[in-house]
Image (cartoon, coloured by chain):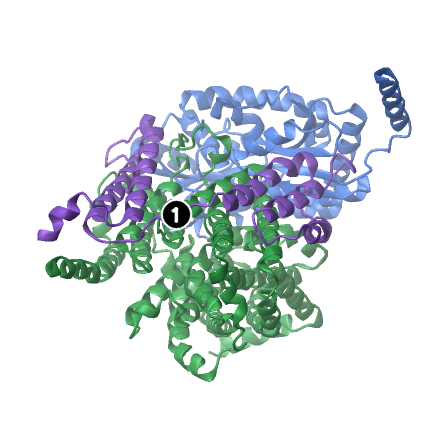
Chain colours: A green, B blue, C purple
Amino acid sequence: MGDLAANLSLGFATALTLQNLGLCFLGCLVGTLIGVLPGVGPIATIAMLLPLTFKVDPTGALIMLAGIYYGAQYGGSTTAILVNIPGEATSVVTVLDGHEMAKQGRAGVALGIAAIGSFIAGTAATLVIAALGAPLTRLALLFGPAEYFSLMVLGLAFAVVLARGSVLKAVAMIVLGLLLSTVGTDLETGEERLTFGLADLSDGIDFAVLAMGVFGFAEVLRNLESPETRDVVRGKLGRLLPSLDDFKRCLWPIARGTGLGAALGILPGNGAVLGPFAAYTLEKRIAREPQRFGRGAIEGVAGPESANNAGAQTAFIPLLTLGIPPNAVMALMVGAMTIHGVIPGPQVMTKNPGLFWGMIASMWIGNLVLLIINLPLIGLWVRLLKVPYRLMFPAILLFCCIGIYSINNNPADVLLTAFFGFSGYLLYKFGFEPAPLLLGFVLGRLLEEKLRQALVLSRGSFAAFVERPLSAALLAVALVTLVVAVLPAVRKSREEAFQE
Amino acid sequence: MKSVVIAIAAALGLASAAVAQPYPSRPITVIVPFAAGGPTDVVARIVGEHMSKTLGQQVIVENVAGAGGTTGITRGAGSAPDGYTIMMGHMGTHGAAPALYPKLKYDPTKDFAPIGLAAGTPILIVAKKDFPAKDLKEFIAYLKANGSKVNEAHAGVGSVSFTTCTMLNAMLGVKPTLVAYRGTGPSLNDLVGGQVDFMCDQIVNLTEQIKAGAIKAYAIATPERSPALPDLPTTKEAGLPDYQVSAWNALFAPKGTPKEVVAKLNDALVKALDDEATRKRLHDLGGVIPDKAGRTPQYLQTFVESEVARWTPILKAAGATAN
Amino acid sequence: MQGEEAGASRVRAPQDVAAGLFLVAIAALGLWQGAELSAGSLGQVGPGMLPRALAALTGLCGAVLVMQAFASPGARLARWPLRGPLFILGAAVAFGLTVRPLGLAVAGPLVVLIGAMASRETRWIEAVVFAAVMTALCVGLFKFALGLPIPVAPWAIGY
């Protein structure tokens, strides 16, 4: 314990220098402002802003980059709530209730609880990293392909629970999302699959392209068609911050979300993406009135947003302790570190303690800074909603196009997004929800990769999934989740049939 | 009337050529055909930063990832040969690509004006912590005895870890079971976790893990030991002298770029490779900087031709294609 | 089940029928494209196995949806105005086609103006001014402040 205190004080001493504080602030601010732009997600933001950090020393540069990362995450949540456009996989869950709240005039409350929840989660996660970072990594290494596969199956079960309307349609969307995730080059043989011969599809469909199309463009199309529903958003302004009552309601969801997000974020291999889904499912399951979810339940924003932020922080653990980046954003961080001469690895903690603990301390400071920056900004964003839609939607379109182009400097991505925009429009007309589609898509790649790896390692035996205890446990939970989710629907249709 | 217009246009053209701006008069774009943060991207950014100073214009990195790097190179090859768009190619895009991608839209030996080699990253043979072999000789013996029972991880068909291990396996005559991963991170992760047995990859990804004892390294496939890992024997010392591979990176310009422009770029590159600070950063990664003789455009051209000749038969024999 | 005989040929949920048929069409497309891929065996999963299984599953969901449409009441099919999709998606396509050859200076206003045509509320002079301002803003922000390698006007200033 004394060790922890000593390390943290070293960390804070490093992080609280005027220069590093300034860099943290700058990073958070810039990250938020860029992350808010629809179409520009955290990866694009960090890649864009990376060169800005070259002028600074390594510790300062990493602090700034971390600030940009959190800022971009939070900015993405802002866009999700205000405009129904998820910037990356972890914001998909936020759109469900967040945007509904915005439509009810409670955008400020949603944004506020997201900021506060994120801060609390961030504080807790920072303590977890500081105290338990190294031992937790060893735990995470127990996750082999079989365990990951079962985790993804669990994620799919969550995706079913997330559905607002017809379970069948939700399942159909999940399956379709899984199908879309297989487009691209086969992992083992290098053959092209479902690419229709298009070179631009040979690396698969980018998440941002799908999300922008199915959510972003389709949302604009929806709003243009029904001006009445759209005006409701701008009619009521409501309160700008959550009330004490709101806050009391969300205390437990925030705590639960933090726990789930922190635990899943440690798993190297992008386990963090499941955090928000798990949190949402949990809240919906244990809520006294689950039908509120999907219609503006504040717990549906508090829980996932906390999970989101906790996961984003603990995702640094595999990076800082093992030197292995768990996802694309962290891989970018590795590159940034390498450019600055710090090669991340198991020995950074011991060889470069100032850097390691400084980063951890600045994580917490970054969260605080984000809270301070964003609470006042909420008023600005909400007022932005009053801009006449006839001007807002072309601006959204422009930002989306630039954002999509910036991912890979490939104009074909923009064309592909337009195609998905049309598909999103069709889905809407047919009464399908887009969120399960994205969830299936996100889970699909990992699911297939881990399934095939596990089968290769077990030489074709499916028993491996149930023989390994962790994997079996996860599958069991998935089964239970599914049964519990589907049972009410089955019972309802049987009741209907009986009434006839 | 039309002839008057043509005459005026021609005169204007000549005039602008006469008062042509000296190269470079605006920022130069380096296309890196991989995602930001990877080894090639890092080398490009480090070298590019110094080149900006020599050339007096910003060198901007543009990441165009896809299809094992060939998407970015294809775009670069088709750019205007005016020296404002160049690319950082590497062993995969300019050595192994013709064999791996039958529908490749460029020829590495013909469609480029080579500028010069930048830093390369040596390849290491590494295995999980408790793999039953103390050194390279035992490792080879184990592989030969256990064939497909041994699990080899790679970062995807067309990746450096795939092609370099394919060469190793061909050389040893073994056929381990291949486990494919999406990228270096996940594959390294499972190696550290002990889920797979071995892998061949660039030093920059592995140094810290080896130093911390999370994985075992058997040899480095370069003629000399690396300062980043001075205790690691070379393949020559460890008993496999023919296995000499490194993931080299080099700058290319599109075919037809004027010789003076290429010379200026080469000069800037060489200056960057001579600069103390840049060298230190590259060495910290484990990078190998080519010597004076290896820095000319002519050397690069011959080198590319020899690489293509080396990789093509091996990869074709292994039946590997990435479409 | 007396209500069923009359209802058997009456579609009670037209939206679901369309939805189901849409899914079946996608499934068919997927199965057609994935036809040449080898499925391998369960022990040695090939590239084709998952795509084909998922496509089949999609089709199944579609079929069940269609059948359900005859059994239980559901939503009607909404109207399909084409003006919105045409111009919004057209704007994106225009951007994609012009951003590299003509740069953001051209692609930006195109997106704003073509997109604006999708709404009946557009006021033209306002839209043109807005297009110019937004484009200038984006160029300043993305190209100069952030250093994004996006072409501005290659036909005029070369980058």
Q: Is residue A399 visible?
A: yes
Point out residue A208 in the picture as x, y percentages from the top left corner: 50, 48
Q: Is residue A243 left or right of residue B58?
A: left
Up/down of A116 relative to B291, above or below: below
The quarter holding residue A490 reads bottom left
The quarter holding residue A19 reads bottom right
Q: Which residue position holds label 1? A: A427
State the residue at coordinates (25%, 46%).
C65
State the residue at coordinates (65%, 39%).
C99
Up/down of A470 relative to B275, above or below: below
Q: Is mark 1 on a helix, strand or loop?
A: helix
In the depicted view, which residue is nearer to us: A302 or A489? Answer: A489
Q: Is residue B119 visible?
A: no
Point out residue A444 in the picture as x, y percentages from the top left corner: 36, 46
In the depicted view, which residue is nearer to us: C85 or B89? Answer: C85
Query: Which amino acid is tagged 1?
Result: Leu
Extreme residue toward the bottom, this view: A244
Point out residue B125 in the picture as x, y percentages from the top left corner: 46, 38
Extreme residue toward the top, this view: B3
In the depicted view, which residue is nearer to us: C137 or A313? Answer: C137
In the depicted view, which residue is nearer to us: A244 or A184? Answer: A244
- Crowding around mark 1 (Cα neighbors within 10 Å: few <14, some 14 to 19, many 20+) is some
Point out residue A330 in the picture as x, y percentages from the top left corner: 52, 54
Q: In this view, does A39 lie to the left or right of A158?
A: right
